[in-house]
Amino acid sequence: MKIALIAHDMKKEDIIQFVTAYKDVFEQHELFATGTTGKRIMEEVSLPVHRFHSGPLGGDQEIGAMIARGEMDMVLFFRDPLTSQPHEPDVSALIRLSDVYEIPLATNMGTAEVLIQGLKHGYMDWLKLRQKQGEINDKQK
Ligand SMILES: O=C(CO)COP(=O)(O)O
């Protein structure tokens, strides 16, 4: 499963704690992140992460492009709702694309917890079926 991890600055500490707490789950999946979030996860949790640009420099859009290509399975985005972001349109675009392609998206730790528990207990297996169906459709094109 390909999982995107993103956190605004005020939520970086939270995402580090979250990924540390569920390291046993995350280490079984392929992780992607915006620049600074990914750097901190690699350094502080010692997990491999594919890093994109920092969010304000286009990282959210790069993750959005993966979603549009059907290459991302889950997005955990710890947003800061109390600070205005210069790249708010990019943030909205990423959330919109998650809805367009029906990708499970958490925008806070509470929902992220439910998604990761679901992943751990196999409730996300329908995603694999969808991937298989996508592969079949691609072959038929
Ligand atoms: O701004 C972000 C998401 O919108 C996060 O970017 P960084 O992980 O580079 O701080």
Image (cartoon, grey):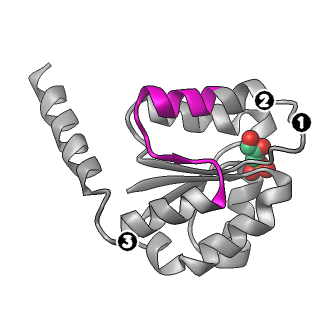
Of mark 3 and mark 1, the one earlier in the sequence is 1
Above or below, 13 against 23 in this view is above
* Residue 141, image x, y percentages: 14, 19
Residue 54 shows in the view: no
The three-letter amino acid code for the residue at tag 2 is Glu
User: Is residue 107 rendered to the left or right of residue 141?
Assistant: right
Label 3: which residue? Answer: 120
The three-letter amino acid code for the residue at tag 1 is Ser
| Region in magenta | 93-109
Label 1: which residue? Answer: 84
Q: Residues within 10 Å of mark 1 (few under 14, many from 20)?
A: few
* Residue 26, image x, y percentages: 49, 70
User: Is residue 107 rendered to the left or right of residue 44?
Assistant: left
124, 87: nearer the viewer:
124
User: Is residue 25 rendered to the left or right of residue 59?
Assistant: left
Mark 3–mark 2 Cα distance, whole angstroms, equals 32 Å
Rendered residue at 60%/80% (across/down): 21
* Residue 93, image x, y percentages: 63, 26
- Check whether the beta carbons of the residues at disc 1 and disc 2 lie within 8 A of each other: yes
* Residue 10, image x, y percentages: 86, 57
Of mark 3 and mark 2, the one earlier in the sequence is 2
